[in-house]
Image (tube, helix red, strand yellow):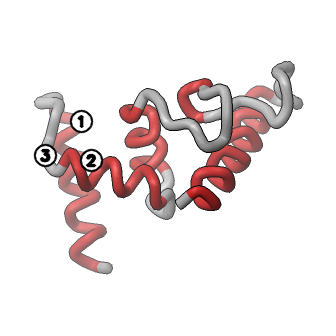
Amino acid sequence: MAAALVQVQANHAREWEAAAGGPARTIPPGPRIAASSGDLLLKCLHAHCAYYLAHQDYAVGRLIFEEINELWCNDERCRGWMSEITAARARE
């Protein structure tokens, strides 16, 4: 899991820089999920969950998401995403 977390933090930094149009102006290696101060530090679990919703191959986010195991938001958009994820899991 540690290797997966380090890799996803690097991926996130590249995505952030691509969206920003250039290199991040932060202390290397760039922005991390939830602005954690280290690649192996987990904070703001909701941010890791959100990253998993956008990147279904993020193993750490999937573990967090599976621990929740229920819809925490009654918003129509969240219900839709939950349905999509449930359908994707059924196809696996």
Asked whether 36 or 19 is in front, the reply is 36
Image quarter of residue 16: top right
Tell me the residue at 59%/59% (across/down): 4
Q: Looking at the image, which is closer to me, 56 or 59?
A: 59
Judging by the rendered image, the residue that carries numbered circle 1 is 77
Give residue 55's position: percent from left, percent from top.
50, 54
Q: Residue at x 83, y 26 (%)?
A: 24
* Callout 1 secondary element: helix
Residue at numbered disc 3: 70
Question: In the rendered structure, which amino acid carries the disc numbered 2?
Answer: Trp
Disc 1 marks which amino acid? Arg
Indicate the secondary structure of the residue bearing disc 2. helix
The quadrant of the picture occupied by the C terminus is bottom left
Q: Residues within 10 Å of mark 3 (few under 14, many from 20)?
A: few
Name the spot of residue 91 as percent of width and height, x first.
27, 78
Asked whether the residues under the numbered discs 2 and 3 touch, taking CB atoms below 8 Å apart as contact, a structural biologist would say: no
The residue located at (38%, 42%) in the rendering is 49
Residue in view at x 42 percent, y 50 percent: 61
Between the C-alphas of marks 3 and 1, the distance is: 15 Å
| Disc 1 from disc 2: Cα separation | 6 Å
Question: Could you say which is closer to the camera, residue 19 or residue 58?
Answer: 58
Q: Secondary structure at mark 3?
A: loop
Distance from Cα at disc 2 to Cα at disc 3? 12 Å
CB under 8 Å between discs 1 and 2? yes
- Please determine whether, in this image, residue 92 is positioned above or below residue 39: below
Lower position in the chain sequence, tag 2 or tag 3 = 3
Residue under pointer 2: 81
Name the image quarter holding residue 13.
Answer: top right
Give the mark toward the camera: 2 or 3.
Answer: 3
